[in-house]
Amino acid sequence: MSEQIRGVVVMGVSGCGKSSVGAAVAERYDGQLIEGDAFHPAANIAKMSAGIPLNDEDRQEWLCRLGEEVASVLDAGNRPVLTCSALKVAYRDLLRQSEPRLGFIFLDLSRELAGERVSKRPGHFMPASLIESQFSTLQPPYSEPLTLSVDASLPLETIADRAVDWWRSSNGAA
């Protein structure tokens, strides 16, 4: 492959397994996990907790901050593994400004399974009522470069193994 991937974004709608997959990928490929939700400004968390979907303006500062974090991890000589919904092409392009060779692992999940998973997730600020808005915003990255789509209903180990194999192969490693 001509372009090596320097870091990855584990992306998709709420409930697709970004945090679990991101942690597993980071562990398997000696990456540094960046939990995107930890960087949301308080106003965004309050809005989502109230059942109000974020808009592009709400996400702008957050995505810029995540891009800075990716660059910082790369500057330190580490492999960033960012968990971030990255629902729109414009959001992914903003993240690519921090590193053009950023790969995206899209965890593809049905509305029904996303809703079921989110409704069973304890203590998270994202209510199941916002799942529909996530799918309305989602622009799947099927034809974008440096992107792997994986069925998010597969077992965690399978998803993580596929993701790491893809990342390694992009970098010429067996």
Image: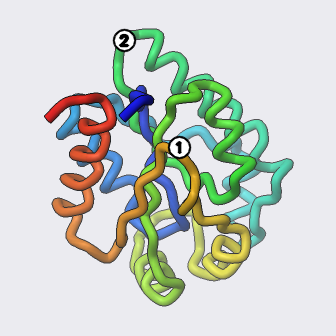
Position of residue 145 in the picture relative to residue 54 (left or right): left
Residue 57 location (% of width, % of height): 85, 48
- Marker disc for residue 77: 2
Direction right: furthest residue: 57
Instruction: Give above or below for 141 relative to 174.
Output: below
| Helix, strand or loop under label 1 | helix
Residue type at numbered disc 2 = Gly
Give the labeled residue for mark 1.
36
Q: Is residue 133 visible?
A: yes
Describe residue 21's horizontal placement relative to residue 157 as left or right. Answer: right
Q: Nearer the viewer, mark 2 or mark 1?
A: 2
For the point 54% across and 62% down, the residue is 142
Left or right of 20? Residue 130 is right
Estimate how packed mark 2 is, as few (under 14), some (14 to 19) or many (20 or more) residues with alpha carbons within 10 Å: few
Across and down, in percent, residue 12 comes to 52, 62
Q: Residue at x 50, y 55 (%)?
A: 11
Indicate the quadrant where residue 99 lies: top right
